[in-house]
């Protein structure tokens, strides 16, 4: 009897579940039919002038693409933000997750909301709307670039700044740390830069903390360790690109600046590996201190989220207590000063050895040095796409040991703003590079101009559009 009762009870439960499922499906079908009638009625009222047409071509992020158009005229998925030919629409789900109201979004993006016919379409998808025209008139983000110049580095630094200005799109703010005797020369030269409004600069003296000032000054090269203190000096700067004086930009600064958006929640800085080929690596063969990864990192091009750097507490091998950036520098120097060769770069390697999750690594083409070609080409990304940032360390811009590097430096140093860069820069440079094929770097001279050709072509397009 007990077994029979259990079977009967189970059958009764299944019957109730089936009944509830049938009722829910009936209600759903009625709702869909009603919704379809309203959509058909709306399309009938719109007629040939349907609002769906302006939205057939849209921008997702900053890349043009065609999106499928659904029955409401806006083919987007949940949580997406897209710019159509007329408006930017943001799903309310995304606003909720970001804890932004319509008012908050307006202030956050500094866009103005206006009533347009496009608003009706956005409301059909429960979206907020922003006029696309308003986006184009907003001020561009300023990119902050820092350099430290001492001794005979004036010409080299100006050439680096010139390369940054020629190709970049957004406004640039230069932070130039230099010895006092160089300030007037920098001012006279930079005041003649023709791009008023696009380029601003600030000159700073070389300064170190009073504790260990003499040791910091003589570490590796004169003034080189100044870059370690940039997060503490430039307290109001959120993000910064630091470069050595012997850097040349062969594509817009905007492109390396965009790596900031690729940082995950733990990353505070980005650098390139010191070597691609461990067999010729310095750190993995000779270092007497911890270093990052397999071959260490090179700090000649260093992109920093300085707000995160100032906030972070760093793991270290001196105490179980995590230390902030300013608290960590002097103890590191005291512990390792007899074991480091490359000064502040070695200290950065030690820091990120203990905090590897905090570093973003970008490819070698963003910091291309003689080591990438003097023993044979070993930067695959540069072979495929060209060099993006050239780093002429070892003084190769000023001697005849690596004529390929020197040819690029001389070409950019001698070109003038506003020149026809095809005839004044690119063509003469290619002729000079062809004279260097007797060297290992000269054998792959195409990688030195592959990206440069594209940058010049893109610049000419922007000039033709008046932007």
Image (cartoon, rainbow, N blue to C red):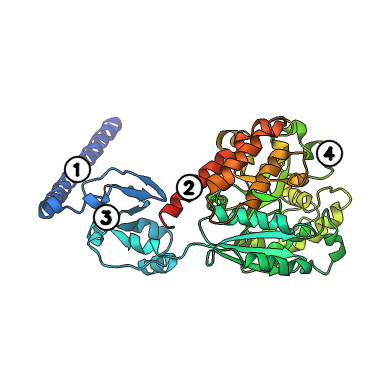
Residue under pointer 2: 458
Badge 4 marks a residue whose secondary structure is helix
**Residue 22: x %, y % from top left:** 18, 41
Instruction: Work out whether 7 lies above or below 336.
Output: above
Residue 125's tag is 3
The residue at 24%/52% (across/down) is 54
Badge 3 marks a residue whose secondary structure is loop
Q: CA distance from mark 3 to mark 2?
A: 37 Å
Residue 314 seen: no
Badge 2 marks a residue whose secondary structure is helix
**Residue 402: x %, y % from top left:** 74, 39
- Packing grade of label 4 (10 A; few <14, some 14-19, many >=20) is few
The residue at 45%/54% (across/down) is 463
- Please name whichever residue, 131 or 171, is drawn nearer the observer in this view of the structure: 171
Q: CA distance from mark 2 to mark 1?
A: 57 Å
**Lower sequence index among marks 1 and 4:** 1
Residue under pointer 4: 286
* Quadrant position of residue 429: top right
Residue under pointer 1: 25
Q: Looking at the image, is mark 3 or mark 2 nearer the viewer?
A: 2
**Lower sequence index among marks 3 and 2:** 3
**Lower sequence index among marks 2 and 4:** 4
Q: Is residue 159 left or right of residue 343?
A: left
**Lower sequence index among marks 2 and 1:** 1
Q: Are marks 1 and 4 in contact (CB under 8 Å)?
A: no
**Lower sequence index among marks 3 and 1:** 1
Q: CA distance from mark 3 to mark 4?
A: 62 Å
**Residue 170: x %, y % from top left:** 51, 59
- Packing grade of label 1 (10 A; few <14, some 14-19, many >=20) is few
Q: CA distance from mark 3 to mark 1?
A: 24 Å
């Amino acid at each position: 009897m007990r077994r029979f009762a259990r079977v009967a009870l189970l059958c009764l439960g299944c019957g109730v579940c089936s009944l509830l499922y049938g009722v829910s499906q009936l209600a759903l079908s009625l709702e869909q039919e009603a919704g379809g009638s309203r959509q058909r009625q709306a399309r009938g009222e719109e007629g040939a002038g349907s609002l769906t047409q302006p939205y057939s071509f849209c921008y997702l992020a900053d890349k043009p693409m065609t999106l499928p158009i659904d029955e409401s005229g806006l083919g987007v998925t949940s949580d997406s933000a897209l710019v159509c030919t007329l408006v930017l629409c943001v799903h309310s789900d995304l606003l909720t997750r970001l804890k932004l109201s319509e008012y908050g979004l307006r202030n956050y993006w500094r866009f103005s909301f206006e009533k347009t016919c496009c608003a009706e379409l956005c409301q059909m998808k429960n979206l907020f709307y922003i006029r696309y025209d308003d986006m184009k008139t907003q001020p561009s983000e300023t990119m902050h670039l820092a350099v430290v110049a001492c001794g005979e580095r004036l010409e080299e630094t100006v050439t680096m700044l010139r390369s940054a200005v020629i190709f970049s799109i957004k406004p640039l703010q230069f932070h130039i740390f230099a010895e006092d005797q160089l300030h007037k020369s920098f001012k006279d030269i930079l005041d003649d830069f023709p791009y008023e409004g696009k380029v601003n600069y600030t000159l700073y003296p070389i300064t170190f903390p009073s504790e260990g000032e003499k040791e910091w000054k003589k570490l590796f090269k004169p003034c080189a360790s100044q870059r370690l203190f940039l997060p503490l000096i430039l307290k109001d700067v959120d993000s910064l690109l630091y470069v050595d004086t012997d850097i040349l930009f062969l594509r817009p600064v905007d492109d390396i600046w965009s790596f900031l958006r690729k940082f995950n929640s733990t990353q505070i800085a980005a650098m390139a590996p010191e070597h691609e080929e461990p067999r010729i690596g310095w750190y993995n063969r000779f270092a007497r201190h911890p270093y990052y990864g397999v071959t260490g990192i090179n700090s000649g091009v260093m992109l920093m989220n300085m707000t995160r750097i100032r906030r972070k507490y760093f793991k270290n091998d001196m105490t179980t207590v995590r230390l902030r950036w300013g608290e960590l520098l002097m103890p590191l120097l005291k512990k390792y000063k007899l074991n480091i060769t490359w000064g502040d770069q070695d200290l950065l390697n030690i820091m990120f050895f203990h905090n590897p999750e905090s570093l973003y690594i970008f490819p070698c083409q963003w910091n291309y040095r003689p080591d990438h070609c003097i023993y044979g080409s070993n930067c695959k990304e540069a072979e495929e796409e060209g060099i993006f940032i050239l780093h002429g360390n070892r003084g190769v811009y000023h001697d005849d040991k690596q004529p390929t590097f020197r040819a690029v430096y001389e070409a950019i140093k001698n070109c003038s703003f506003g020149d026809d860069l095809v005839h004044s820069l690119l063509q003469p440079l290619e002729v000079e590079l062809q004279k260097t094929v007797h060297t290992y770097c000269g054998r792959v001279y195409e990688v030195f101009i592959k990206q440069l050709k594209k940058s010049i072509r893109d610049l000419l397009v922007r000039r033709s559009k008046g932007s």
